[in-house]
Image: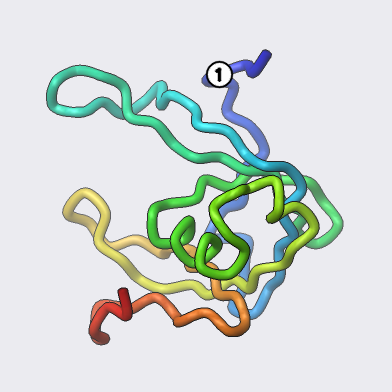
Amino acid sequence: MAILGGGGNFIKTSEVSNGDIITFKNPGDWVESTRFKYDDGNPKVDFNIKVEYKGEEKQMRLNKTNREVCIAAYGNDTTKWIGKPATITKVRCMIGGKMHDCIILEIAGVAKPATSDEEAPF
């Protein structure tokens, strides 16, 4: 059974650098957000996956863009992602009307996600 809302040891944009590598350690889970709700009052859900980063196991919340990059590279069965790498790129992005540093995953052979100055590749 998963324990929800416990915080966890998540990767933070402040601790990563461009070019850092993560390795997927489990197939991940959809987890109800304890902080954010849709307009209708239902809780939002996040896709959280365990990764190895610099020798430590961490949790990472994958947004839609990062999930699509991983699906393009490794398929939609996340059990097949286990042991596979991804490269971190930090970009500035708009979240909730404010600019934040965000982690974008890149995988060799897969189109790079668009930044605000580029046209989206998908």
Q: Is residue 73 left or right of residue 57?
A: left
Amino acid, disc 1: Leu
Q: Which residue is mark 1?
A: 4
Q: For the point 57% across and 53% down, which residue is it?
A: 12
Q: For the point 39% across and 61% down, which residue is it?
A: 65
Quarter the C terminus occupies: bottom left
Q: Please tell me in which quadrant of the rendered image residue 23 appears.
A: bottom right
Q: Is residue 65 left or right of residue 48?
A: left
Q: Is residue 2 left or right of residue 103?
A: right
Q: Is residue 53 above or below residue 38?
A: below
Q: For the point 76% across and 48% down, which residue is it?
A: 25
Q: How many numbered marks have been drawn onto this rendered protein structure?
A: 1
The x and y percentages for residue 102 are 43, 63
Residue reaching furthest to the left: 39
Q: Please tell me in which quadrant of the rendered image residue 40 appears.
A: top left
The x and y percentages for residue 57 are 78, 46
Q: For the point 19% across and 17% down, which residue is it?
A: 41
Colour scheme used in the picture? Answer: rainbow
Quarter the N terminus occupies: top right
Q: Secondary structure at mark 1?
A: loop
Q: Is residue 117 above or below residue 34?
A: below
The one of 65 and 103 positioned closer to us in this rendering: 65
Residue reaching furthest to the right: 55
Q: Is residue 21 above or below residue 19?
A: above
Disc 1 crowd rating (10 Å Cα; few below 14, some 14-19, many 20+) is few
The one of 85 and 95 positioned closer to us in this rendering: 85
